[in-house]
Image (cartoon, coloured by chain):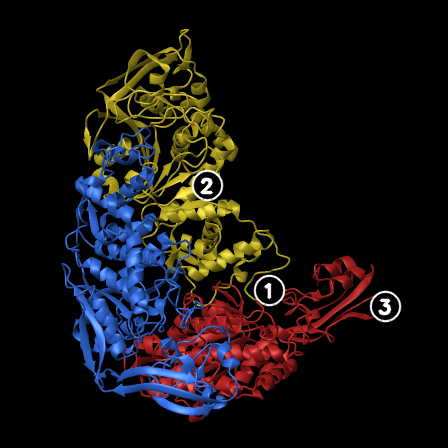
Chain colours: A red, B blue, C yellow
């Protein structure tokens, strides 16, 4: 059985709950571009899957970049004149601008304000900010809190530091029948943001755990790396093997109920693009399917012109379009097990297509073969899906001329891939269809799925 | 003169009446997939055209199928306890499930119901049902009648039988200048259904009778054969010559006032597809032009992947979308001479395009030739169609570079093909245009159609 | 600097005023297809630019045409019974049908009416009429005036004549770096019609005067010739060199406030087509962009199949769609300096694109180069155009793979060409981008345009 089984085996409710629980366990950790937070996250994921943890020394040159120092942070606060912690890193790691330099000082409110970030249009929320490449320090707080601060002297302290160490990322290869790979990638550098991207890390970890027991046509490479520099580092270290990647997905923000959103790869017509588009159009009445643009997550790097890999981005709500994005509202209340279940279903449905999109040939191409004699009409006459299934048989027979894959057929028939591939299996089991040499066969139909029902009224049949 | 003359000669009212009368004469006959009903129908059509009647022995293997036995039926009824015929084959042959096995029995109402088909949603109508490949018997009646039947013992009798004989179909070849063929096909197996398909048989027979006196570029092959098995049989018997078919139409349901509907061939861009699309778009404000799908009439067989012939389907209302479809309401009240006239006009207009879609070359391609000097603007200045005709001259001159056929030009100009081809004739008569070698020329313009009118105001001319 | 400077140097208000003044000076002249009016117009334009005036003898054969005689007109009138001039050529040259034969006669009103043209639907306006190829005479007046004429004897006089002389046209070649040419053409045969085409003559003359001081990549050929016969004559005399024309525009009716309208070249996808479409879509919320059709101005000749030049038509209101068209209302009140300014801006913006549409190559194509380190994000962080400019940098880097020109990138990014080409200059100045051999480089960025602003919040940057 190929990847198809992923979806077939799925107990949606249970999967959603497991993914949510994993995301929740990642949420409190203070991650950054490099340092202990990433390492702790990888160890936690490693309890579920045999993840390899790679360490790349600080300062290593990777293309136009160099690997940054590790950031360490132990504590941070702002105290008022009364010595009370009015902003406290211990209550939320978003309060400190990520990658801040250390500071310990007393200052007037006006000077403090130069180092405070707020969201005036969302005055209750704390923003998420980073300062990776400018040496500076800062705090984030709600705008309401900032506005309410009285004049006075404030004590600010960030007990952080930088050290020459290494940047960490996690990698797992599930081997399939071929060395051709599907890349599944999520960024691991954000601190306490639940949807962006505890959700993506958790979903892909769960998917990897399910794949462990599954025989697949393609190999699957999972990559959990810091945004931008992590992907660039991996590309630099794997430059020779990158051509093995035949399809890929960047996964982030998959725990909310928006979208679904798919951003196409740079080329725009890779199999993963067509598969995700197909799945989203059948799963949603208003999917958000957008062309590639060179901003976003690590598809920026995978789709840089020197690589131009067929890698798209799957999300529920599109980044930067939902109000919780990059704020303290992107917390565990914002993500739900149900949304994880449907996101997981969409991703695995698309991977099923990639796994099973084979090209078949009708062995009786002159006129239609007589389906009635073989019981293929009656087989499905009693089912409410009958007419669709009969049409699927006719579509597969008509277009299986060696030039159309099953996805080609599903698209032209405007039917879900699963119905088309089920029809192909049924026809193959009757020796009406054969595999075109060089393409993988779909798995044989399990006998249990075939139930003979005596039809009362044949509404679609050999005769019209 | 080519096929163009078909339309030119048409007295629309008379044609519509003749086709209707022929359809009406076919309506009472109880046709089936094989047997005397088909033969009687072919003999009747043979009175109008020199139709060859082919007989194919029962049991002959044709691709994946075999030719069925002949069905004979003499009488059938259901009698109530009082011995009254409450359902009578003599009043409508739809009352018996077509190809029913013989039966003579007495049974309770509950058992009878197992063999009765009705239309609960159209309770006044009798459905049309067949049972070609399951050995069974049955009756059709209105749902209201069935609901009103009292409990009791009923006598059922179907005096039918099967015999080893032959399946019949009719064929006629009108020879044109070339051996390249246009296939025109209608199914002949339905009993008393007026639109589906007495209408198609009648229209094509009338068309064949008109073609008899017409010199055409292409050869025209008319085929009147039982649905599915008839087309498959013909394909099997003519496998070698099928490549001669360059365009084709399946014709059914052409006597009602719906649509017009054109279903494209499998390839979707054959000349017949473009011609029918062109004609329907100019004939109707909302034509129903649909892509190929592998269900319907015998285009299913012609467009099977082993043949993939450029054959489309022309209908008025699309099958299975009008309430009279496959019911007793598809009777002679449902079809009208006027609708036949317009269906005939659309089909012949499209065939005119196929006949006359030649490629011309402008003999004065550098700048415009001076039309005013030749009286070509003044020629049409006084006509209300003047500006359109002038534009047609300019379009033909501009696009006749050897790469655009007249239909290409008509499509780009968004003008009816007839105006473009008239313009081409006029320009050719002035030696401004010449035929591209290898393509057939349009017929010369008859002198009578050219009337010189002295223009008052030249609104489209050499100068702007 | 290339053509880009044209727009950059433009003081819109001043340009609009200069073009209007020039158009106003052309307005009173009674032009025709050949004769002193054209010559006087060319001399007037020659005061602004070094225009070569070509004279082609009457009767010269040019393709299917011959050059017409010169038309001379000194006076014309209709006098009523009282001897009063009720229609007077001296008050408007539109009153005489252009190219009228001489006449001096007395006649009854009924006979006079045979020679009078009016506009019954626009009863206050005097139409513009010509009679180039039918020997006849006529007057134009308002319909109201005609209706009010009493019965009586009228004296008509047209003091005109024809002489064997020559047809004149003006030509100017601005030499660029290459011999490849951009053709800019306007018709010069219409008498007192301000928009059609004093406006086009004036705008192109102003453009030529600005180009005189500008170094360009392409050579620019300006042509001011009588409609149809002038273009045909030029094509006949320059047949060998026509292949140098790589892009071109016919310009007419550019002084009103309608449109903007662009009619594509016959091929439809020349660079000028894409450039004008791009400019108009960014300049107007509802540009009128239409496919080629073989009627209009001299694009008819340039786009005839024997030449098929990539020449489009730019207008504000489309010809024959505005009520002032070809009437006495197309006067100096109908055209405005502001409209000239915006028309000029659109034309020069499109020419800027043609000049600067080069193909670049990203020198760091593997992953993104680190823009933050080079100050390229911060450079624009403080500007309100910052995010768009940052996106432009990313688009240029991502698509500069040697296969996409800057216009390709602007179209895919859906951003104005200027922002994309500015981004390319900036990246080139940082050695991140290099010219693809064989394509012209965009000009280097002038240092003055680069202002470093310290960013407060990096909203688009290396990290997401």
Tell which tag, 2 or 1, sits nearer the viewer. 2
From the viewer's perspective, is B87 left or right of A371?
right
Residue B311 visible, this angle: no
Sequence order check: which comes first, mark 3 or mark 1? 3
Q: Are marks 2 and 1 in contact (CB under 8 Å)?
A: no
Chain letter for mark 2: C
Q: Which residue is mark 1?
A: A320
- Dot 3 alpha-carbon crowd within 10 angstroms: few under 14, some 14 to 19, many 20 or more: few
Chain letter for mark 1: A
Which residue is pictured at 46% across the width and 32% down the height?
C323
Label 3 element class: loop
Q: Which residue is mark 2?
A: C260
Residue C331: % across, % down: 45, 26
From the viewer's perspective, is B401 left or right of A464?
left
Q: Which residue is mark 3?
A: A82
- Dot 1 alpha-carbon crowd within 10 angstroms: few under 14, some 14 to 19, many 20 or more: few
Which residue is pictured at 52% across the width and 59% down the height?
C374
Mark sitting on residue A120 = none
Which residue reaches farthest right?
A82
């Amino acid at each position: 059985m190929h990847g198809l089984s992923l979806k077939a085996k799925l107990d949606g409710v249970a999967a959603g709950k497991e993914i949510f629980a994993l995301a929740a366990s990642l949420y409190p950790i203070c991650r950054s571009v490099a340092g202990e937070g990433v390492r702790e996250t990888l160890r936690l994921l490693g309890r579920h899957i045999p993840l390899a943890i790679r360490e790349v020394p600080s300062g290593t040159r990777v293309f136009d970049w160099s690997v940054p120092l590790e950031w360490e942070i132990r504590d941070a606060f702002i105290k008022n004149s009364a010595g009370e912690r009015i902003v406290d890193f211990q209550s939320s790691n978003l309060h400190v601008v990520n990658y801040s330099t250390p500071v310990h000082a007393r200052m007037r409110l006006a000077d403090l304000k130069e180092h405070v970030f707020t969201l005036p249009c969302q005055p209750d929320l704390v923003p998420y900010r980073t300062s990776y490449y400018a040496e500076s320090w800062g705090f984030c707080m709600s705008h309401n809190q900032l506005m309410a601060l009285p004049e006075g002297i404030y004590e600010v302290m960030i007990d952080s530091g930088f050290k020459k160490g290494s940047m960490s990322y996690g990698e797992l290869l599930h081997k399939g029948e071929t060395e051709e790979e599907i890349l599944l990638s999520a960024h691991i550098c954000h601190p306490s943001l639940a949807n962006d991207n505890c959700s993506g890390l958790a979903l892909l970890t769960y998917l990897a755990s399910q794949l462990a027991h599954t025989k697949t046509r393609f190999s699957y490479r999972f990559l959990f790396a810091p945004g931008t520099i992590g992907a660039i580092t991996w590309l630099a270290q794997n430059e020779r093997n990158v051509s093995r990647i035949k399809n890929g997905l960047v996964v982030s923000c998959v725990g909310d109920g928006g979208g679904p959103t798919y951003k196409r790869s740079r080329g725009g017509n890779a199999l993963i693009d067509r598969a995700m588009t197909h799945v989203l159009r059948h799963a949603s009445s208003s999917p958000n399917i957008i062309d590639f643009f060179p901003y976003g997550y690590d598809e920026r790097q995978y789709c840089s012109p020197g690589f131009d890999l067929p890698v798209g981005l799957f999300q529920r709500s599109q980044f930067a379009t939902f109000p919780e994005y990059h704020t303290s509202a992107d917390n565990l209340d914002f993500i739900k097990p149900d949304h994880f279940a449907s996101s997981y279903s969409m991703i695995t449905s698309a991977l099923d297509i990639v796994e099973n999109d084979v090209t078949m040939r009708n062995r009786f191409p002159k006129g239609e073969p007589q389906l009635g004699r073989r019981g293929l009409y009656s087989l499905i006459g009693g089912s409410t899906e009958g007419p669709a299934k009969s049409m699927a048989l006719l579509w597969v027979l008509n277009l299986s001329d060696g030039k159309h894959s099953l996805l080609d057929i599903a698209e032209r028939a405007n039917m879900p891939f699963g119905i088309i591939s089920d029809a192909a299996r049924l026809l193959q089991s009757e020796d009406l269809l054969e595999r075109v040499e060089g393409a993988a066969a779909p798995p044989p139909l399990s006998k249990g799925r075939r139930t003979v029902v005596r039809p009362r009224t044949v509404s679609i049949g050999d005769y019209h």
